[in-house]
Amino acid sequence: MFGAEISIMDYFTEQNIELFLERFRSLGPLPGMLLTFLKSFVPPLPTIVIVGANAAIYGLWLGFLYSWIGLVTGSLLTFWLIRKASDTPFIRRWAAKPKVQKAMVWAQRNGFSFVFLLSLLPLGPFVVINMAAGLTRMPTVSFAAAVALGKGVMVFCVSYIGTHLSDFIDQPVELLGVALFIAASLWLNRRLQAYFTASAAVTPEPADTMK
């Protein structure tokens, strides 16, 4: 089964995604929005590759819009589903895991900042963030605003890179900037997780927020 998952994920290369988008371009924005929407339910999907491909196929602004709509809609649906299913035995068992408990503490203490800062990054535990926010019953308006703003900045940066990739290849110095952007995102993601983990360690575990 693990091998099958790897082979499926191997399909999601930039070339294959662009071919998929070109093939179904007659459907308008639906293919581009669908791929980014699925990111909230299939965590291994490569956000940078999909958002970049959308920008390359649809253009900077339309690609940005379609990716943003897909990511925000997927996040909101995940958040809403977890809030509705928070009392089910399966979600309770999942929420009892240490990593999820820490994320719930982060979301409960920091709310908007927690979701906004981690949504800025093209790489990160997006599904855990959305689900933790839903479990702590973070206000829907605050969650929606944080996700919309954070992912808006992230998607625009990645879309800009996707539409100017050939320029970056022709100018290695600018390509180095892209590599530094990705590396900085990884570093910042780890730093933010370490910060919130430290905050959770000195904060009492939250009461059962699902009651």
Image: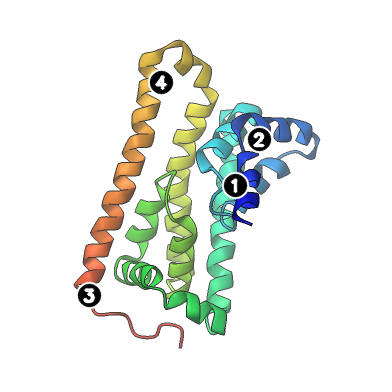
What residue is rendered at 29% in x and 79% in y? 205
Q: Earlier in the sequence, mark 2 or mark 4?
A: 2
| Crowding at mark 2 (Cα within 10 Å: few <14, some 14-19, many 20+) | many
What residue is rendered at 53% in x and 28% in y? 162
Real-space Cα separation, disc 1 to disc 2, in angstroms: 16 Å
Hey, what amino acid is under mark 3? Thr
Q: Earlier in the sequence, mark 1 or mark 2?
A: 1
- Residue 79 in percent (x, y) is at 53, 67
Real-space Cα separation, disc 1 to disc 4, in angstroms: 28 Å
Image colouring: rainbow
- Would residue 101 be found to the left or right of residue 147 on screen? left
- Would residue 206 be found to the left or right of residue 71 on screen? left
- Residue 160 in percent (x, y) is at 49, 29
The residue identified by callout 2 is 17
Q: Earlier in the sequence, mark 1 or mark 3?
A: 1
Q: Earlier in the sequence, mark 4 or mark 3?
A: 4
What residue is rendered at 55% in x and 62% in y? 76
Which quadrant holds residue 99?
bottom left
Q: Which mark is residue 203?
A: 3
- Would residue 122 be found to the left or right of residue 198 on screen? right
| Crowding at mark 3 (Cα within 10 Å: few <14, some 14-19, many 20+) | few
Hey, what amino acid is under mark 2? Ile
What residue is rendered at 26% in x and 69% in y? 200
Q: Residue furthest top?
A: 170
Q: Which mark is residue 6?
A: 1
Decide which of 164, 94 is in the foreground and name it. Answer: 94
Hey, what amino acid is under mark 4? Leu
- Residue 7 in percent (x, y) is at 64, 44
| Crowding at mark 1 (Cα within 10 Å: few <14, some 14-19, many 20+) | few
The residue identified by callout 4 is 175
State which quarter of the image contains the N terminus.
Answer: bottom right
Q: Are marks 2 and 4 in contact (CB under 8 Å)?
A: no
